[in-house]
Image (cartoon, rainbow, N blue to C red):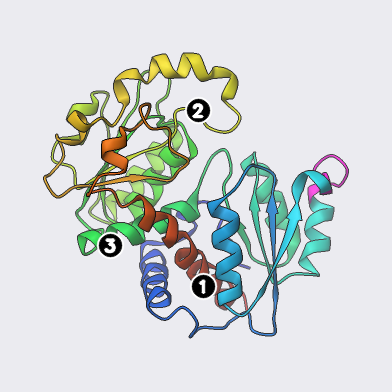
Amino acid sequence: MRHFLRDDDLSPAEQSSVLDLAAEMKRAPHDAQPLAGPKTVAMIFDKPTLRTQASFAAGIAELGGYPMLVDGKLAGIGVREQVADVARVLGRQASAIAWRTFEQSRLEEMAEHAGVPVVNALTDQFHPCQLLADLLTVSEHKGGTVGQTVAFVGDGASNMGNSWLLAGATAGMDVRISAPEGYQPDAQIVDEAIRIADGTDGSVALEPDPRAAVAGADVVVTDTWVSMGTEDEGEARTEAFRDFSVTTALFAEAKPDAVAMHCLPAYRGKEIDAEVIDGPRSVVWDEAENRRHAQKAILTFLLEEST
């Protein structure tokens, strides 16, 4: 049984194949119908959501399936119902499960007991579906991912920092993470990304100076400084990240044709200037749309690999 729980669950060849399939599905959104019947995909949300719910629901419908919405709080997963029991129940009702939750361990337990493919729709540690969408967006605007330099500026210890390390290395990119002291990515994730990059001609670098990280980059990425679950740290985080905002001046350090990315929601005037995210080189809305196509592709891949 194949699952997509973290970015390195896909080999470089598999990731490339999934991205090619996503591009094909974007061109012809109704041609592939692996969920015709319709087959059901359970979507569980423990955290606030807009793009994840909308893109999964639309994508599952385009694949010929039925998106079954499960309110994680109403179900009381891990409180009223054990994760393993929920997995066993949903695995008999659905052909796949997409879960947006907190600890990665909860997702791993779901995958262990579900008997159907489980997709990480976001955890505190990783956001792999977003990265597939991001890589698809890079490919569209840069003609591919191999050899492209991406600078992630902000919270390197976040799920987006972790996923950019693993997915970017898998895609053969040169990944630079620029984060303030105390917000560096997990050393184990960095080591894994370096190992992957050694086999894809990519590279991984931690650069404490955001200007040096962005200099000559093809892609500049940021994310909110205050992620879900860290709201009580808002004031301290705003102070710590003050010099790590993607301002117009910082973005100017990148290549003249560099693109700006943000997975949203965005807070203009904090992690990114309005002139950047709303400017002509922002590809943020392509990113948001590409969640649908990327998720359709990974669901199709997992269903085919698990038969």
Residue 74 percent coordinates (x, y) = 82, 46
Q: CA distance from mark 2 to mark 1?
A: 33 Å
* Closer to the eye: label 2 or 1: 2
Going by the image, does 136 lie left or right of 304?
left
User: Which label sits on residue 226?
Assistant: 2
* Residue carrying label 1: 301
Counting labels gives 3
Q: Percent x, y for residue 106?
A: 69, 45
Position of 91 with respect to 292 (left or right) is right
Q: Residue at x 41, y 58 (%)?
A: 133
Q: Is residue 220 above or below residue 147?
A: above
Along the polypeptide, which appears first: circle 3 or circle 2?
A: 3
Residue farthest toward the right in the current orientation of the protein: 80
Q: Quadrant of the N terminus?
A: bottom right
Lower sequence index among marks 3 and 1: 3
Q: Earlier in the sequence, mark 2 or mark 1?
A: 2
Instruction: Using the rendered image of the protein, determine whether residue 221 is visible from the camera's viewpoint.
Output: yes
Is disc 1 placed on a helix, strand or loop?
helix
Q: In the rendered view, would you say 300 is above or below 114?
A: below
Side of 223 relative to 91 (left or right): left
Q: CA distance from mark 3 to mark 1?
A: 19 Å
Residue that numbered label 3 is attached to? 139
Q: Between 190 and 243, which is closer to the camera in this rendering?
A: 243
Cα distance in 3D space between marks 3 and 2: 29 Å
Depth check, mark 3 against mark 2: the one in front is 2
Identity of the amino acid at label 2?
A: Val
Q: Which residues are magenta?
A: 75-83
